[in-house]
Image: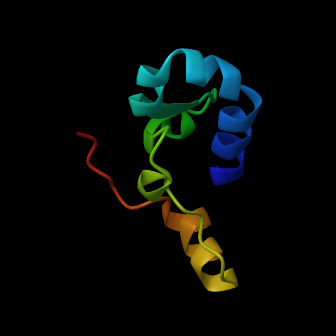
Amino acid sequence: MTLVLDTFAYADKEFLQAFPDLMRAKVYVHFQSDVQDLDLREYWGVLGDRRSWRRMPRGVLARLKLLLFGFPAVRSS
C-alpha cells in the first residue's frame, strides 16, 4: 500500500502543491467485496506523513499471519 500512496503523491504532486491542506488528509481504503467480512474500510494514515502509513509484513510467516488473521485493529483519530 505504501507504493500506491507514494505513486499517488508523485503523480499528483502539482495538484498537492496547489492545495497543500490535502497533505493532511486521512487516507481510508475501501476494500469492496460481495463477502461481508471482506468488505472493509480501513484507515491507512495521513497522506503527507509516511511514518503514519501502514506497513505490509515482509517475512513469510508474518504474511501468512496477515492472510489468516488480518491486520491488528488500529484506532483512527
Is 62 located above or below residue 16 in the figure? below
- 67 sits to left or right of 43: right
Which residue sits at x=44%, y=58%? 51
Tell me how many marks there are: 0
Q: Residue 77 at x, y = what percent? A: 23, 39
Q: Residue 44 at x, y = what percent? A: 47, 44
Q: How is the image coloured?
A: rainbow
Q: Residue 33 at x, y = what percent? A: 63, 30
Which residue sits at x=45%, y=39%? 42
Which residue sits at x=49%, y=39%? 37
Q: Residue 15 at x, y = what percent? A: 64, 17
- Residue nearest the viewer, comparing 52 with 29: 52
Is 14 located above or below residue 26 in the figure? above
- Residue nearest the viewer, comparing 57 with 15: 15
Corner quadrant of residue 34: top right
Is 35 located above or below residue 64 in the figure? above
Which residue sits at x=61%, y=64%? 67
